[in-house]
Image (cartoon, coloured by chain):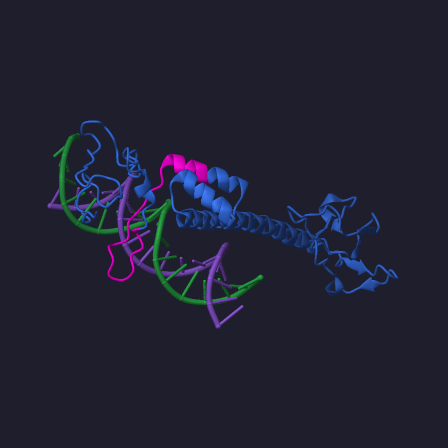
Chain colours: A blue, B purple, C green
Amino acid sequence: MAILPNTSTCLELTMSIPGLPSSLSIPSPGEGGGVSMKDLDINQIPSGGEEECMEDDDESPNGGPPRKKLRLTKEQSRLLEESFRQNHTLNPKQKEVLAMQLKLKPRQVEVWFQNRRARSKLKQTEMECEYLKRWFGSLSEQNRRLQKEVEELRAMKVGPPTVLSPHNCEPLPASTLTMCPRCERVTATIAVQQDRAGPTTTTATGTTTSANPTLSAKVGFVRPRHPSAAC
DNA sequence: AGGACGCCTTTGGTTACTTCA
DNA sequence: GGTGAAGTAACCAAAGGCGTC
């Protein structure tokens, strides 16, 4: 059975649905019954027509009837979601069972899982994108603060921070600061020269502190969500 | 080699919403 | 202001190609 697509009106089914009488028309929203297209379950199988849902007539190689659009029922979606929560992939047996349960073809279940995985991944990517944006924002802010601090230090005519070698405590050029590839923290030792208060030497694996808060130099940053607490 | 499977991209149908006469 | 047609965007099932095992 095939109903010619009728895209000009929503009052009639615009696709052929196995098991659905061809004369079936759907009242528009507002018409008697108050059933909207969205509420209407076009896959609802009329009594006696269940098997036809699995009818293998939608493979439309060249020349065949136009592809049909299936809309899963709420119950089917719910069950699929439920089983997706338990397992993101199905083995053939699970697929078969689920398909039987849902009165769908195994291929349909397979496709649903495929699309569902894709949606999950998209969502995940979007979340990561948001996270990176926020991280970038906080780094920019941190950078801005540090620049400001540098300005302040320069204004106070304080010499540049001296980095001491962890081995012999000899001063190192700042360019030899190394960053841990894993946690991205600077691991050099930093001595901040201070007027009057004398040098404050700290290990700069994270933040340095100083008696004078305005002279504290934050070196490196703690990347959020780092898997391990310590380097 | 070839079959099964998953991923990716694209296609096409449906629906909700907006605009305009 | 209410109404219906046309246009548009978003969503999603499905197809097809490709890589991997």
Using residue A188 as the reference point, say whether residue C3 is left or right of it. Answer: left
Q: Position of residue A60 (x, y in %)?
A: 29, 57
Which residue is at 54% across, 43% downward?
A87
Q: Position of residue A85 (x, y in %)?
A: 52, 40
Which residue is at 18% across, 38% downward?
A11
Q: Position of residue A32 (x, y in %)?
A: 18, 27
Dominant secondary structure, magenta: loop
Image-quadrant location for residue A211:
top right
What's drawn in magenta, residue-wise? A57-80
Using residue A22 as the reference point, say whether residue A193 is left or right of it. Answer: right
Determine whether A78 is above or below A1 in the image.
Answer: above
**Residue toward you, A198 or A62:** A62
**Residue toward you, A76 or A139:** A76
Image-quadrant location for residue A155:
bottom right
**Residue toward you, A46 or A146:** A46
| Total tally of numbered discs in the picture | 0
**Residue toward you, A161 or C6:** C6
